[in-house]
Amino acid sequence: MRAILVLLILALPLGVWAQPQAPDTVWTRFMGANGSGGSCKDVQPTADGGFVGLVEWLYTPCLIKLDAGGDTLWCASYSNETMRYGSFNRLRPMPNGGFIFAGWDCDTGLVLICVDSTGGPRWRCTVPNAGSGVFDFCLTADGGYFLAAAGPAGAFEAKLDAMGDTVWTRKSSGDHSTCNLRVWPTSSGHTLVAGSNQHAGDPLWHVGFFLLEFDEQGDTVRMNWYDRPGRDVELYDAMQTGDHGAAILGYSYTDTSYDGSVMLIKVNASGDLVLSREPSTADWQHFVVETPEGGFIIAGETATLTRLDGQGDVEWTRTYPLGAPFDDLFMGTRPVPDGGFIACGVRRIAGIQPFMVRFSTELSAQKSHLAALLAEAELKDCYPNPFNPSTEIAFELPRSMNATLKVFYVLGREVAVLEDGRLSAGEHRVSFDGSGLPSGVYFCRLAAGDNVRTRKMLLLK
């Protein structure tokens, strides 16, 4: 098995080891006839490896389910939900396999529609007087929903129960967001809202990013503000990162010219700024996805993907022409469990036509996975050694795996079990206390996967 892995890794092009490579498209699916007036507003992966897209045909919402190969399995249209002065543009999966999609109309306000796993309607609710089209929502830990909306009349938040009934609403003065909102739940049961607005404390009223945390009752726990001195910044997208922080993507410009640059910031779980970059890209970037290595993929207007490393530096940029001539617009991008991506949008060639496109895993990610399979666990020398009465033992795992760390007396008697279970990839440090043991030679033994490593320790009292 190891010999096969070695051959697979060595077979990768030399450039793959040095630089991540842009993924290829696996398939592209256009829906309906060109010029039919539709656009795919959002897309979500499903547990069976397929995808569901939220498509709008002449203001009428429709859900389309594709299998893993991009073939259509079913289509559900909701003709009685046509919006005259609004749009459906948010789709969220539910734990039971169903979906929630939402839109805003100036006649009715926010509309949420819950359907089952085949698109069959379950319930519908309306939240009137909720902003003016800028909104987002998320599922909460208790099975309900948190809504945030914005508009000239002020900020609006609402909590709904699992059937869409209103639990509470909050409204505050001021323009909550000038461009977009993103909402997601935290592990503590709170909700984070990211957006952009004018800062009242700035004498020039520059626009900046904000991050708001609400508790279960809708009370504000904290607010963080992130600006760009001398410039305005408007939010396009935001997401929770793997370390429970946040990545916020937007556009930085001056108040005298809208020509500007893409801006990406990263904050930690407390809201402290850890990264602020304006990467050089040729396209407006509207969506951000975190990579397994802690970098980011940002998707642009004209079917362009750009990869940034963990420091915000550009590693590659690629435009994917889906038609000839092409004028393709990405309207949503999501990660796929295998490390690839799914994107949706609209092709504008003498008319408009919705599409979904499946991207493969990055070549660098494929290499990293194979290399991780080949790599072995490492047990490092303990420090101090000799020791009295305690020492620290460090070891490193190439991937998540079951591991045991035990200490034995020189004659073979087991004296301590320091670790026993499934551990995450990376470095681990464990303290060993020999206060109740006699002086002498001991051995520390790490068993991880098929690897066994041993180190000698000397206890001197």
Image: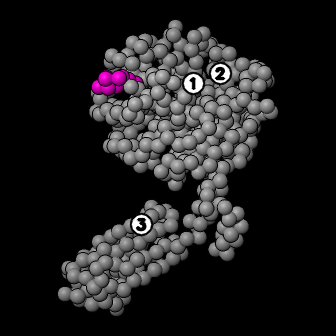
Q: Tell me the crowding category of disc 1: few under 14, some 14 to 19, or many 20 or more residues within 10 angstroms, Cα based.
A: many
- Disc 3: CA contacts within 10 A as few (<14), some (14-19) or many (>=20): few
Reading the image, the residue beneath label 1 is 89
Furthest-front residue in this view? 256
Q: CA distance from mark 2 to mark 1?
A: 8 Å
202 in magenta = yes
Residue 208 percent coordinates (x, y): 40, 30
Magenta stretch contains residue 304: no
Q: Amino acid at mark 1?
A: Asn
Amino acid type, residue under disc 3 in the picture: Glu
Q: Which one is in front, 228 or 16?
A: 228
List the residue tagged with mark 3: 427
Asked whether residue 26 appears in the rendered view, the answer is yes
Q: Quadrant of the C terminus?
A: bottom left
Q: CA distance from mark 3 to mark 1?
A: 42 Å
At 50% from the left edge and 67% from the top edge, which residue is drawn? 398
Disc 2 marks a residue whose amino acid type is: Glu
User: Label 2, on which residue?
Assistant: 56
Check disc 3 and report its element: helix, strand or loop.
strand
Is 167 located above or below residue 389 in the figure? above
Query: Which SS type dominates the magenta stretch?
Result: loop
Q: Residue at x 52, y 54 (%)?
A: 293
Residue in the foreground of this view, choosing between 190 and 116: 190
On the image, which quarter does residue 204 sit in? Answer: top left
Q: How is the image coloured?
A: one colour
Magenta residues, start to end: 197-205
Confirm or deny contact between disc 2 and disc 1 (CB under 8 A).
Answer: yes
